[in-house]
Image (cartoon, helix red, strand yellow):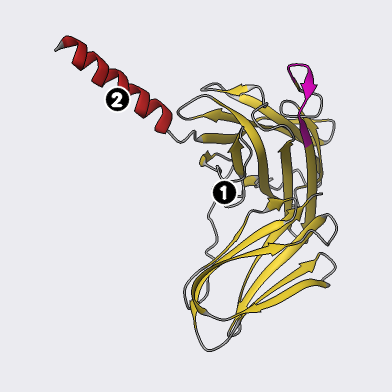
Amino acid sequence: MKKTVFVVLFLLIFTIQYSMAGIIDVRFADAQKVDGNFEVTVQVKSQDIDFEIGSATVFFDYNAEAIGAPAYTPINFSADKKCGPISVYSNNFSFLERETKGEGNYAILLHAPNAGCPTVSGDWVDVARFSFKIKDATKKPNLNFNKKYTAFNKVVNNGEMHTIGNALSMDSFKPAPSGTSDGFVNIFPNYTQHLIQVEFDITSKSPVNINVYDMAGRMVHSEAKAANGRQLNTIDLSEIGSGYFLVEVENAGKKVSEKVLVTK
């Protein structure tokens, strides 16, 4: 009887341990003003189980009237970080400033699945240090994670294990709704080597037009789908170059768009 109870408890603990999602918290930490710059560190920690990070993207917004022209220094998960004898990570950072709003996208790419490091546990781990030029010290930086786009993969790096917990920031974040008057539209991921998924649930007489534009406003891809309910469409951007692109879904005069970073 005791042996049976022990086995049941062991299996229960084993099942609970390996069924947990692996959820990450993200925050800005150690904000300082240094020689006319505003500096801050992005950190991550695990909410539940320990694991290593595969690919990831950290998307943030900021007040471009207060700070601008961000630069970054990788700390962990960088090209200089070796996991054993090899370096398996690379990094990419892009930013865009328009009038009062700035956006930054810091990307981590794991080139050797199941070889990532270091282990993310319940302690905060430094990801990268960002430095912004201070434009107007009387205004707030309003530095926020874009929770819709900030995401981390586990070390397997198969693109199917995005899971995020709390995107903690220096100011409150209110996610903007996306959708049409008929159903919903999802465009993901926001960081890819060439494949974009466009999911929608729309039923109307008008077709669903999927258009892709570069940052100069030029259309680089276009296709039309019949609006006959829920669909998942794969858009292959392997024939275009790297950079930011705007993926737009239009139906009956309603539009939903998302910015996507494509890296080769």
Residue 54 x %, y %: 65, 34
Q: Residues within 10 Å of mark 2 (few under 14, many from 20)?
A: few
Q: Which of the 4 quarters of the picture holds residue 112?
A: top right
Q: Mark 2 sits on what residue? A: 12
Q: Mark 1 sits on what residue? A: 147
Amino acid type at mark 1: Lys
Residue drawn at (77%, 54%) of the image: 262
Residue 221 x %, y %: 77, 71
Q: Which of the 4 quarters of the picture holds residue 40?
A: top right
Start and end of the magenta stretch? 83-90
Q: Nearer the viewer, residue 202 or 151?
A: 202
Mark 2 or mark 1, which is nearer to you? 2
Kindly report the distance in space between the C-alpha atoms of the residues bearing marks 2 and 1.
33 Å
Judge left or right: residue 220 versus residue 127. right
Residue 237 x %, y %: 76, 61
Task: Identify the element where label 1 is drawn.
Answer: loop
